Image (cartoon, rainbow, N blue to C red):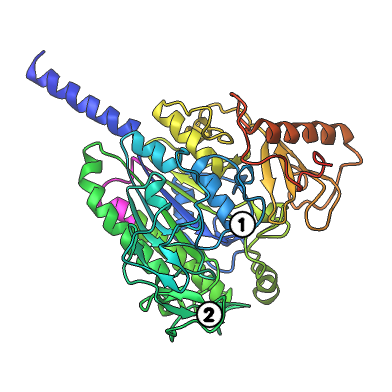
């Protein structure tokens, strides 16, 4: 082979490797409603130009869903491709401290990509449990934190353990807090936002109440977004040269906005027409733009997949925000965070990958954040073991514009233990939950706002879907394959299955 042909062959192979292994950035925001992106809500009272850019340069999944309606279970589903209610957590969320909900040895997005040659990092809010040294009031912060992101497939971690309404509040890098959380505090009033709080100094040396939060002397709530973006970019800087030479990276950037406390930096005050919340969303959008700018400056945008989505629908303040400003964070959908209705789990879901995805394209069929694991596996031509990604259905062909089948049935889960199943146009909400409500059936193609219960008119549809949700729960998986055990026997929320 001539030197020229050998050079061409080498360049072709290098290009093939790079194309086969795109970089991955997942930007996960907190409590952002479908109507909080101006590209999705024409009546939005503020603009999100960088989020809109992702839609304009990538694909909008208009029927995209979080795995749950609150924080911890959605993050579990995103990272594992498995519904969180299959674990021991059936309702609610975790605090900062506790056994990590992701079991040792379970495949995650990070471990899967790491095992396939990726450098992996998590920056931001974790909220899946960490094992801190000692107990509250009796810590030894010279010892490392365990059972945390570095044990779940991530090479690097910089962030905070959970939401700011829980302890422990400190800036962690790796297993150690940069400055130990040796002080204590509690929520303070937030004067600029609706029904809100702050986590800011002064802090005290000893707890006053049993539920006081552990906090580091240098921790201030308003610093989170800026610090997370700065640290993410610093990590990306260290990966840039390797990425240009075929060593891909995966970054999971988990922001704390627009979750409470709603605390926009002063430079964003007075922008938009939805008060502090709108300003906070404008700031969030600006941080998204900083990441996109980094990709452009480093000439890595073309072969980097950027996924932007939210862990659940908007906080209950969406009602007062609509009354006061006329901004609908849940857009046309019913209710918001914690709810089994669409506003609780239908969220912005945008994917940009210029090398493969048609700019400005849309996909109108259902997808779920659990589907990322199977999608990346298909992208890399790899198989997922039977005991991994049990509820992950690849949307790779939908992403790249190929003929894609309708997604297998999807299960929704409300914070108070109510379940629903979605298949095609139909959504069956099961009895149960806090108010022991009855079954409801909606045709989302004609009634996306879930105003007309059709269960009396379509009993056969309801019966078919009830059978299907029971099978999915009992089999321990949505996808074809060997049945897998749930982590517990049948539980009380499954009232149609459990006497």
Q: Position of residue 181 (x, y in %)?
A: 39, 73
How many marks the image carries: the answer is: 2
Spot the residue most to the top. 1
Left or right: residue 2 versus residue 441 is left
Image quadrant in which the N terminus is located: top left
Q: Which mark sits nearer the N-terminus, 1 or 2?
A: 1
Please rate how many residues cluster around mark 2, counting C-alpha atoms within 10 Å: few if below 14, some from 14 to 19, many from 20: many
- Label 2 secondary element: loop
Q: Quadrant of residue 274?
A: bottom right
Looking at the image, residue 49 lies above or below residue 21: below
Please rate how many residues cluster around mark 1, counting C-alpha atoms within 10 Å: few if below 14, some from 14 to 19, many from 20: many
Q: Residue at the spot x=75%, y=34% of the render?
A: 470
Question: Which residue is more in the foreground, 360 or 161?
Answer: 161
Left or right: residue 366 versus residue 465 is left
Image quadrant in which the C terminus is located: top right
Instruction: Nearest to the eye among marks 1 and 2: give it.
Output: 2
Residue at mark 2: 186
Report the magenta residues as a range: 293-305
Q: Position of residue 182 (x, y in %)?
A: 39, 76
Q: Residue at the spot x=32%, y=72% of the render?
A: 179
Looking at the image, residue 129 lies above or below residue 165: above
Q: Position of residue 419 (x, y in %)?
A: 73, 46
Q: Quadrant of residue 288?
A: bottom left
**Is 488 contained in the magenta span?**
no
The numbered mark at residue 70 is 1
- Label 1 secondary element: loop
**Is 294 contained in the magenta span?**
yes
The numbered mark at residue 312 is none
Q: Quadrant of residue 254?
A: bottom left
Left or right: residue 215 versus residue 447 is left
Q: Position of residue 297 (x, y in %)?
A: 26, 53
């Amino acid at each position: 082979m001539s030197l020229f042909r050998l050079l061409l062959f080498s360049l072709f192979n290098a290009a093939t490797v790079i194309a086969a292994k795109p970089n991955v950035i997942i930007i996960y925001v907190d409590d952002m409603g479908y109507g909080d992106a101006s590209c999705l809500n024409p009546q939005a009272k503020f603009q999100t130009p960088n989020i809109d850019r992702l839609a304009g340069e990538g694909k909008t999944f208009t029927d995209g869903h979080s795995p749950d309606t609150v924080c911890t279970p959605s993050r579990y589903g995103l990272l594992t491709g498995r519904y969180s209610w299959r674990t021991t957590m059936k309702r609610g969320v975790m605090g900062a401290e506790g056994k990590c909900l992701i079991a040792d040895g379970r495949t995650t997005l990070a471990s899967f990509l790491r095992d396939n040659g990726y450098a992996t990092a998590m920056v931001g809010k974790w909220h899946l449990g960490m094992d801190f040294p000692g107990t509250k009031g009796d810590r030894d912060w010279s010892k490392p934190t365990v059972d945390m992101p570095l044990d779940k497939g991530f090479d690097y971690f910089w962030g905070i353990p959970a939401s700011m309404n829980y302890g422990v509040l400190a800036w962690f890098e790796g297993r150690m807090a940069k400055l130990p959380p040796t002080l204590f505090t509690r929520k303070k009033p937030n004067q600029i936002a609706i029904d809100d709080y702050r986590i800011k100094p002064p802090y005290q040396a000893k707890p006053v109440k049993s539920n006081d939060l552990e906090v580091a002397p240098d921790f201030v709530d308003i610093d989170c977004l800026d610090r997370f973006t700065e640290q993410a970019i610093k990590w990306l800087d260290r990966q840039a040269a390797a990425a240009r030479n075929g060593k891909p990276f995966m970054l999971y950037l988990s922001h704390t906005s627009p979750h409470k406390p709603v605390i926009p930096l002063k430079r964003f005050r007075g922008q938009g027409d939805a008060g502090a919340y709108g300003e906070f969303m404008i700031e969030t959008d600006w941080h998204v733009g900083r990441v996109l700018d980094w990709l452009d400056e480093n000439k890595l945008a073309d072969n980097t997949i950027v996924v932007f989505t939210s862990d659940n629908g908007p906080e209950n303040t969406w009602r007062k925000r609509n009354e006061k400003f006329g901004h609908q964070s849940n857009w046309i959908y019913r209710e918001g965070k914690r709810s089994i209705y669409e506003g609780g789990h239908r969220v912005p879901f945008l994917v940009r990958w210029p090398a493969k995805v048609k700019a400005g394209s849309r996909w109108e069929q259902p997808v779920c954040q659990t589907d990322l694991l199977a999608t990346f596996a298909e992208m890399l031509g790899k198989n997922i073991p039977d005991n991994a990604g049990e509820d992950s259905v690849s949307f790779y062909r939908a992403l790249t514009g190929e003929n894609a089948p309708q997604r297998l049935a999807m299960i929704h889960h409300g914070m108070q233990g109510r379940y629903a199943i979605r298949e095609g146009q139909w959504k069956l909400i099961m009895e149960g939950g806090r108010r022991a409500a009855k079954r409801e059936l909606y045709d989302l193609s004609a009634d996306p706002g879930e105003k007309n219960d059709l269960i009396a008119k379509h009993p056969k549809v309801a019966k078919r879907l009830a059978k299907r949700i029971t099978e999915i729960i009992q089999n321990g998986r949505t996808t074809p394959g060997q049945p897998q055990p749930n982590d517990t026997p049948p539980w009380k929320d499954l009232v149609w299955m459990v006497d």
